[in-house]
Structure formats: C-alpha cells, structure tokens
Amino acid sequence: MSRLVMVSNRVTLPRNDGQAAGGLAVALEEALQQHQGLWFGWSGTVLDEGEPSLHEQRRGKVRYAVLDLPRDLFEAYYNGYANRSLWPLFHFRTDLVVYDRNFEAGYLAINRLFGERLAPLLNTDDLIWVHDYQLIPLGRYLRGLGCSQRMGFFLHIPFPSPSVLTTLPGHADLVQSLFAYDLIGVQTEADRRALREYVVHEIGGYCCDDEWLYAFGRSVRVEVFPVGIDVEDFAHLAGTITARDYERRLRSSLVGRELIVGVDRLDYSKGLPQRFAAFERLLERHPEHLGGVSFLQIAPSSREDVPEYNDIRNTLETLAGHINGRFADFDWAPIRYLNRALSRVALAGFYRCARIGLVTPLRDGMNLVAKEYIAAQDPDNPGVLVLSRFAGAAEQLDAALIVNPYDADAVAEAIHTGLQMRVHERRERWNTLMAALRDYDTRRWRESFVEILEASQESPLQEAEI
Ligand code: ADP
Ligand code: G6P
C-alpha cells in the first residue's frame, strides 16, 4: 500500500488531551493512520522575522510536518488572494471580490514555498492528496520540482460557473494549475459541469466519458465525491449523557416553545442576514408563532482580519437587535444569537432539541451542519431540515424542505410547514435523509478518492490523439 501524503492549509495537530478534534479532521487522520501517512501544512504560526522552519511530530503511524509562514506573504496569501479573491469568487460573490496583483503574488509564493519544503519529504510511490482553494497551484510547483507521484486535488468549495470565473484576471492560469493533478475531486455534479463547461468553452479543451478533461496538453480525471459525516458516530454523540444534558438545559429554558436552530461560521456565504429576515417574515406572516418559537443562531467569528467578515458581523448584530426589539415580550426574545464556537457535544444536543434545522447558505460546497442536524435527531420524534438549494448537500438531501434562501417568504413558509408537520411525515422524510447519509459517509468519501487516485493511470484518450 502506498503512503498517503495529505496537504492542507490548516492541519489538525493531535491534541494533548488525546481527544479527537471531530468532523472531517478525524476522517482524514483515520485515512493517514491506515496508510502510515504524512500530513503537511501551515503550523498556525506567522513569523515577523527569520526563516520559516518546519516542525514535526508523530501520533501512532501518522507524521505531521507543519511550516511557519512569513507574515507579509501570509497576509497576501490567506487574508488576500485565498479569502478576498478566491473565496468570494468561488461562492459567486463577484461584488465582494478584491483582486490585487500583490495578493496573487503572495498566494503563488506560499504555494511555491509549500512545494519546496514538501518535495524533499516525499517518496517515489507516495499518493499525494491536496485540499482546497488555498493550494490549487501546489501540484504544478511539485511537478516543476520533478515530483512524478500520483497527485489528487479535492475542492471543498463550489466551482463557479464560467461567467463568474472569467471575471478573475489570470483565470486560465489558475485552471491550468488543476491540470498538474491526476485526479480532481469536487462536491457535486453541478461543480463538475461548471469545470467542464469552462474547459471546453473557454479553453477549447475536450471532454470524454463525462469524467476526463483534456486541455493544456494534459488530461485529468474529474470525479464527484460528496463529503459526508460519520453518521453513526454523530448519532451516538447526540445520545450521550453529556449531549442529553445540553438538550435538557436548552429545553427547560424554552418552557414549551419550539426551537429553530442555525449553526454556521460567521461567513457571508451562509446567508445569515437573509435567514434573519426570513425569520422576521415568519413572525409577520404567522403571528400565531409569536411567543411560541425561538430561533437560536450560533455563529462564531471567522477570518477576522478580512474586512468583509467584520461587515457581516455588524449587520447581524443590528438585525438581531432590530427583530428582538420589534417582537420581544417581557418573557420571550425571538432570537438568541451566540457569537462563539461550542463543543461538538453541545451542538449535537442543541440539534436534537430543535424542531427545525435552518441551513440556508447562498452558496456552499457541501454544508456538513445539514448532515449533522439529521444524524442527531431522535428517530421517534425527528425535526425537519430546511435546506438551501444552493448548498451542495441539496443534491443528496432532497427529502429536506428545499428553499431558495433569497426568497424570505418561501423560507418563512417552509419554517411554518416544518413547525406544523405531523410526526408521521417527519419520520418518513428523516428515514430517507438518513439513508442518503449512510449511503455516502466520510469513510466512503475518502476511500473512493484514494482508490481512484491509486488506480489513476493513462487516460482513455492518448495525448497524441488530441
Ligand atoms: P464550513 O466548512 O464552510 O465552515 P460546514 O457546514 O461544511 O461549513 O462545516 C462546518 C463544521 O464546523 C461543522 O462540522 C460544524 O459542526 C462546525 N461548526 C460550525 N459552527 C460551529 C460552532 N458554532 N461551534 C462549533 N463547531 C461549529
Ligand atoms: C471551509 C474551507 C476550509 C477551511 C474552513 C475554515 O470549510 O473549505 O478550507 O479550512 O472553511 O476556514 P479557515 O479560513 O478558518 O481555515
């Protein structure tokens, strides 16, 4: 079995207390344990002076190698190109894209640095798996350094439509970097279609059997791997004494009211102002819910050095104040807004307590909160998922109440429908949703990716035929 080398901007280092971090990080670490792997990425430290040094540690069969990054390049790479250019662009927010040549230069320099520091650690038959938009050019730099290993790339966020992508100066160069890999993984069919359309119509490349793309004198296989969760593990977590305790404490504070829950990083792609407006619309259109329902939104700050993230924070605080000011009574506030991260077990308890899971991003690669909400439900009395059609998860979870997050009236009506829904229909929908989650969980996601990467060889069409 080949060694697996995982590369991501953030690396989840083993915790001193031996506890797992949870979520996707655990799934990736499990894959590394099986493959005696190496996880390479940023150490989390930014240096004001001195040479960036590599730190190594080991847990079980996994080796971690993490790199400090110089401040000036990090600013341009992370707070610049990755999160002010690519993130808004790939989430279809051309209005928020800030393009700056220095950002791009910093992004390329950090990718080059990653390549230079990673290349000496590689063995000839390693499998290399690069994650996400921060590291698109890494494969190309590694190839330039003579690395001929099988290399795969997985994009965790959406792939934008060609008309959006072409607004980025240097878009063809960015896409050409993807062709340094042997395998590109995306979350949904829609993402694969968008990449194919770009390559065929913008670059004049070719597509064969849906999964092979030819352009820039290279071929690459493109597959859909929807990221999942560890369903049984999350369901188990929601049933533990600690989770039940969180659930009980929250329930007793509700004094018989129904709960709507939202859990997201504080990010403009999550559609939080639109969600608050839809909740306000519910109270306007259905005054019978006044005093009868509470909306708990948990949204810890994220990427705080990026100005657009502070704007969204201010907007939400104002909106929550406005809605509470308009509708609250002396013994009831419609919105409870928590601007901090909670433990996974607390989230599991809160999901289980909520009649409605409200997941309404304007765009999202997948959205794992939607899946966690389903897995945490009580099978006898499950809640209802209200899910944006623009979350990647909607391709699999069509038994949820699917909504257009821009349409406040429609979201308000879906919440109302969920609040009224009989237990028989809730169970039926929940069973269908659970079956979809079990069908493609994290294990299947990572094993399919690694298997296809391992088997990757010459494409069905030889380069000479193109
Ligand atoms: P994204 O990757 O864009 O943040 P996802 O929904 O795919 O969105 O994944 C978010 C992950 O972070 C989930 O596993 C979720 O449980 C976790 N998370 C989100 N909000 C919080 C919070 N307030 N406290 C703790 N964990 C959170
Ligand atoms: C999304 C991205 C990840 C990123 C995470 C947290 O899930 O797809 O690549 O790591 O958000 O964002 P941060 O900028 O804090 O790493």
Image (spheres, rainbow, N blue to C red):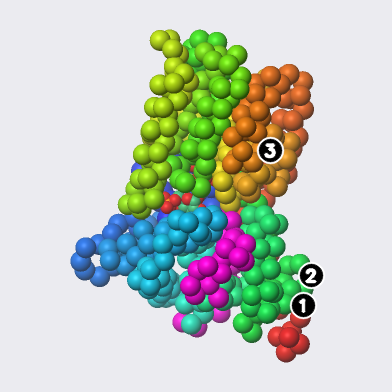
| Element under disc 2 | loop
Q: Quadrant of the C terminus?
A: bottom right
Looking at mark 3, is its residue's CB closer than 8 Å to ligand 1?
no
Horizontal and vertical percent position of residue 379: 69, 24
Towards the viewer: 155 or 401 = 401
Q: Quadrant of residue 283?
A: top right
Task: Count every numbered label the image shows and give the total.
Answer: 3
Task: Report crowding for label 2: few under 14, some 14 to 19, many 20 or more residues within 10 A (C-alpha).
Answer: few
| Left or right: where 443 falls relative to 348 | right
Q: Looking at the image, tell me whether mark 2 or mark 3 is earlier in sequence order.
A: 2
Q: Which residue is mark 3?
A: 402
The residue that appears at 74% across and 36% down in the rendered structure is: 399
Q: Is residue 132 magenta?
A: no
Q: Please, what is the dominant secondary structure of the magenta stretch?
A: loop
Q: Quadrant of the N terminus?
A: bottom right
| Left or right: where 232 falls relative to 56 | right
Horizontal and vertical percent position of residue 104: 40, 70
Name the amino acid type tagged 2: Asp
Looking at mark 2, is its residue's CB closer than 8 Å to ligand 2?
no
Residue 226 in view of the camera: yes
Towards the viewer: 249 or 76 = 76
Residue mark closest to the camera, 1 vs 2: 2
Q: Which residues are magenta?
A: 145-172
Residue mark closest to the camera, 2 vs 3: 3
Q: Which residue is mark 2?
A: 209
Mark pair 1, 2: CA separation = 9 Å
Residue 388: numbered disc: none
